[in-house]
Amino acid sequence: MTSTDALPHGEDPREAAREVPSEDPRDDAPQFVLPLVVRIEKAAPPSRTDALQTAARAVLALLSDERATAEDGEWARAVRDWQDARIRKVVRRARGAEWRKAAALPGLTVAGEHAEVRVFPPVPLDGWPKELVKLQVSGTDLDDPGPPAEADPARPVLWLNPDLAMSAGKAMAQAGHGAQLAWWVLDDAARRAWREDGFALSVRTADPARWAALTTSGLPVVRDAGFTEIAPGSCTVVADHPLLRSCHTSL
């Protein structure tokens, strides 16, 4: 599920994420996409919330990996090119032999409670590896067996817009955007602590009465560029990290 409009690296997401300009210079840059593949076996699909949280953690795992962060890292150029344009993420699904072929490509597999998501270094928009381009985008319809537990307020929470209906794939990409915006705002010590905590986080749908306050709180907000499923400029996720929350008005 394609989802865009996280911000270029170096731009403050607390400010710039508030508006999606009609003419964006990022559109003139070569376009890249971050592929994510979620494992969905027929007999044991993951729950929706588990998949969303695992996708967000997978994005953070790639952003913090030395192959992406070191100046001469093998993924560093691709990540820089990706971050200089629109921050696109596409989620596809795989099972069985498809999953094994995808897992053999360079990338990282992150496990949740039951979910498995593999993230790959960015590729050109029209330059997907053949093992991934064959995978289905549609069909990532996942459910939770019951209401998720209350989010731990001492750890990061990615709040989803309660008024938007998104497929699981779309929501996974949006959760990844929210995690990425939070990552960009944090300092090195906070990033290191988050990584040492296994990028623990929750993804929850916000209470409708609280959503407006979240979007105006100063916390990072993801606005979708509207390529799929929802209208351009829609607020999809607010990234609420304890270290960011302490800097802003209480909600």
Image: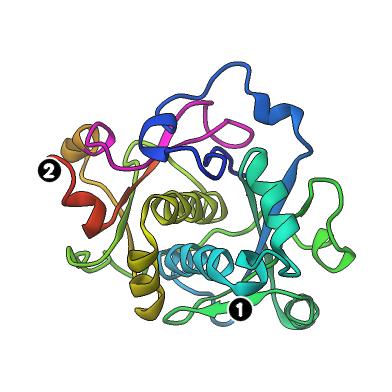
Residue 251: assigned label: 2
Residue 49: give x, y in percent of width and height.
40, 65
Counting from the top left corner in percent of width and height, residue 182 is at 39, 52
Q: Which mark is residue 109?
A: 1
Q: Amino acid at mark 1?
A: Thr
Q: Secondary structure at mark 1?
A: strand
Residue 105 location, quadrant: bottom right
> Which of the pair 65/31 is nearer the observer?
65
Taking 22 as reference, is 148 left or right? left
Front one among 27 and 172: 27
Residue 52: which numbered mark, if any? none
Tell me whether the residue at label 2 lies in contact with that at label 1, contact meaning CB atoms closer than 8 angstroms. no
Quadrant of the rendered structure where residue 144 is? bottom left
Of residue 154 and residue 247, the one placed in the foreground of this image is: 247
Looking at the image, which residue is at 28% across and 34% down?
A: 215
Residue at the farthest left position:
250
Q: Is residue 118 magenta?
A: no
Residues shaded magenta: 214-235
Tell me if residue 170 comes above or below residue 62 in the rendering: above
Q: Is residue 122 visible?
A: no
Return the x and y of residue 56 as percentages of the image width and height. Answer: 47, 62
The reply, left or right, for residue 129 in relation to residue 9 is: right
From mark 2 to mark 1, how far is it between C-alphas?
A: 35 Å
Q: Residue at 47% of width from left, 70% of height from top? A: 54
- Residues 167 and 202: in front is 202
